[in-house]
């Protein structure tokens, strides 16, 4: 694709990067067929190629974002399915991230949008605030139907309330803790504990630590490490995202670590990109080192996992989180591990399509998210699974509540290696006596 940035524009390193990305697109359109928003809405402007044109026009003309750019770029899930499909290696992720920062800096959103986005940015990255908000949302959930009308505001508020779990799990506070290996110590890693994950499903971190410890790996969670910054990064809040990245790079660099383990793949994609995010920062070298050490839990377990329990006779529908399959290009390891643990693994039709979770997308774009959720659940349930497993808390929350228990794959692996049975399976069994999950 030809571009026409001026020399002065190209002196800005971020515009120079955008220019290189834009020039690599040959507008072949292969990416449209695998883009969930194009598949759902059928509008070229809701396809990767359409968005690339919108971004090019906005940046080249150095003009503030307008309603049209905001509408179609906000509708992008950042699922990165287009990047897996693209034969020209277009780095759509860096381009859309840049566009989101441009929108944030140049576009004034309606007041209600600003209030909701601000609240999400101030609550979700902080586990204690998130827990308090979930407590309130649980109360509000019972009266969600009273929210008037079909306005976008009402739909967003209902979507927020509906994310609250029926029961709040016990609070988890892992910052500053060290979990020694059982037996001979074979490795030492830091775990990114996640923000929403600690509030919604602390059992995922518990299972991760328990499994790693039993495999001889010491796990630390430095007190100074916190939110990875993904949430604010995807909102275009660049400075907040950089601050989160710098804080984590400093905290992890101060430790002698073999790896940084991430069990929330949405966070993993961003941590693996810290090297790029901070490439013009004094911490650039450290950030690149941390990105190289970042590993999804499935990547790390691949060489060391050994089950100890007999095969449980359970069929697992594996849902590939976009951030794992497209963002990190990790497809086979979770399925190999689940099979090694003795599960029968099935996959839905169109596994490349997003479930509609995508960070705060299911709140901000409730209609598209609901449509993608329904599609994903129908294709998963068509395989008659006993349980749905994924490697990302956002997907698990999005797919919960439709009659099939949802668990993180690491909870299943831990169970088959001598850990506790995932509570979601036990409680499902209690509700559905006769189910083979016993
Ligand atoms: S597949 Fe790649 S090169 Fe083709 S239009 Fe999409 S982004 Fe551009
Ligand atoms: S990131 Fe996903 S939703 Fe956005 S353009 Fe690419 S395929 Fe479409």
Image (cartoon, grey):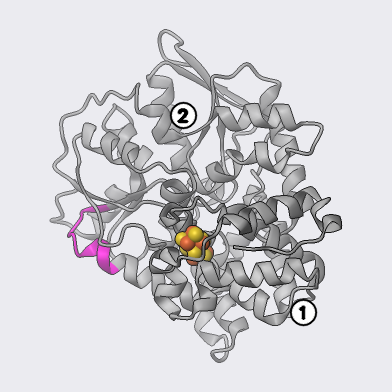
Residue, far top? 184
Residue, far right? 8
Residue at 71% over, 27% down? 286
Decide: marks 2, 1 in contact (CB < 8 A)?
A: no
Residues 309 and 15: in front is 15
Q: Nearer the viewer, mark 2 or mark 1?
A: 1
Q: Position of residue 407 (x, y in %)?
A: 35, 48
Task: Say if residue 149 shows up in the picture.
Answer: yes
Q: Position of residue 130 (x, y in %)?
A: 62, 55
Residue at 57% over, 38% down? 272
Disc 1 secondary structure class: helix
> How busy is the neighbourhood of tag 1: few (under 14 within 10 Å), some, or many (20 plus)?
few
Q: Is residue 133 magenta?
A: no
Magenta span of residues: 378-387
Q: Is residue 1 above or below residue 262?
A: below
Q: Position of residue 240 (x, y in %)?
A: 76, 50
The answer to whether 383 appears left or right of 66 in the picture is left
Residue beneath label 1, please? 111
């Amino acid at each position: 694709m030809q571009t026409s940035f001026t020399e002065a524009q190209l002196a800005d390193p971020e515009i120079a990067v955008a220019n290189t990305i834009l020039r690599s697109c040959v507008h072949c359109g292969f990416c449209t067929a695998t883009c969930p928003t194009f598949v759902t809405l059928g509008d070229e402007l809701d396809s990767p190629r359409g968005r690339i044109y919108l971004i090019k026009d906005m940046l080249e003309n150095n003009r503030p974002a307008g309603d049209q750019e905001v509408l179609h770029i906000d509708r992008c899930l950042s699922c990165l399915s287009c990047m897996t499909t693209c034969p020209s290696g277009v780095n759509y992720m860096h381009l859309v991230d840049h566009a989101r920062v441009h929108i944030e800096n140049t576009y004034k959103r309606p007041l209600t949008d600003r209030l909701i986005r601000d609240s999400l940015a101030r609550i979700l990255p902080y586990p204690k605030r998130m827990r308090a908000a979930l407590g309130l949302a649980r109360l509000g959930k019972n009266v969600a139907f009273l929210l008037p009308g079909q306005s976008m505001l009402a739909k967003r508020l209902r979507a927020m309330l509906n994310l609250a779990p029926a029961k709040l799990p016990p609070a988890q506070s892992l910052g500053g803790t060290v979990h020694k290996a059982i037996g001979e110590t074979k490795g030492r890693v830091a775990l990114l504990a996640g923000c929403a994950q600690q509030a919604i499903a602390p059992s995922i971190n518990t299972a991760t630590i328990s499994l790693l410890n039993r495999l001889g790996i010491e796990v630390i969670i430095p007190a100074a490490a916190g939110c990875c910054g993904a949430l604010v990064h995807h909102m275009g809040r660049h400075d907040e995202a950089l601050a989160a990245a710098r804080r984590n790079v400093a905290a992890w660099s101060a430790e002698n670590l073999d790896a940084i383990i991430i069990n929330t793949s949405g966070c993993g994609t961003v941590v693996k990109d810290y090297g790029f995010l901070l490439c013009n920062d004094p911490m650039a070298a450290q950030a690149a080192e941390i990105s190289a050490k970042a590993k999804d839990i499935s990547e790390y377990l691949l060489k060391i996992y050994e089950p100890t329990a007999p095969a449980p006779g359970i069929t697992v529908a594996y849902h590939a989180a976009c951030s794992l399959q497209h963002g990190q290009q990790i497809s086979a390891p979770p399925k190999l591990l689940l099979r090694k643990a003795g599960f029968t693994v099935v996959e839905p039709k169109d596994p490349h399509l997003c479930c509609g979770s995508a960070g705060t997308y299911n709140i901000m774009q409730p209609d598209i998210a609901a449509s993608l959720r329904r599609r994903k659940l129908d294709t998963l349930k068509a395989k008659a699974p006993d349980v749905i497993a994924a490697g990302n808390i956002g997907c698990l929350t999005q797919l919960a509540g439709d009659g099939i228990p949802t668990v993180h794959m690491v909870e299943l692996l831990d169970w088959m290696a001598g850990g506790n049975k995932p509570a979601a399976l036990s409680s499902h069994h209690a509700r559905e006596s006769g189910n083979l999950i016993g």
